[in-house]
Amino acid sequence: MTRSAAREQAFMLLFEKLFNPEVDCGKIYELAAECEVIEENDFTHGLFIKADENTPAIDEIIKANLRQWKIERISKVSLAVLRLAVCEIEYFDDIPVGATINEAVELCKKYAGEDEYIFVNGVLGSYSRSKQK
């Protein structure tokens, strides 16, 4: 499985978690694999767990890079994509930031509303620039 495909699976799991915050990540992963919604994969599992464990810190980063928006207004698709991307940038040093942003934009183009990828790209670009300083 490609890393892009594994990342897409992690996105789907994070999206599911947004609708079922009380359900344990292990259970969500297990059920998704059992129902063959996802293919078991270490990167998918690790990214999903890391993003969920660090959601409060990740959300603070997202909030800090929003311009005239509140996190509550972000669509669930875009929020899941942003959480995934910020998690990768923060906690996975072996993944180039540019690749992470590009993958996030592609996920948005596939799953989100018409121009949401522009918003996600802007938030991640702002975050990336702030990290470089």
Image: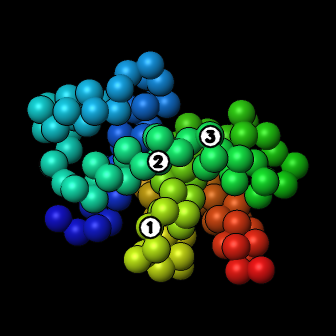
Q: Amino acid at mark 1?
A: Phe
**Quadrant occupied by the C terminus:** bottom right
Q: Position of residue 117 (x, y in %)?
A: 59, 59
Residue displayed at 51% across by 57% down: 87
> Could you tell me the amino acid type at mark 2?
Ala
Task: State the SS at label 2.
Answer: helix
Residue position for label 1:
92
> Residue 113: x, y in percent?
57, 47
Pointer 2 residue: 51
Q: How many marks?
A: 3
For label 1, the crowd category at 10 Å Cα-Cα, with few meaning under 14, some 14 to 19 and many 20 or more, is: some
- Give the Cα separation between the discs numbered 2 and 3: 9 Å
| Whole-percent x, y for residue 62 in the image | 69, 52
Q: Is residue 56 visible?
A: yes
Position of residue 25 relative to residue 82, above or below, is: above
What residue is shown at x 17% (from left), y 65% (from top)? 1
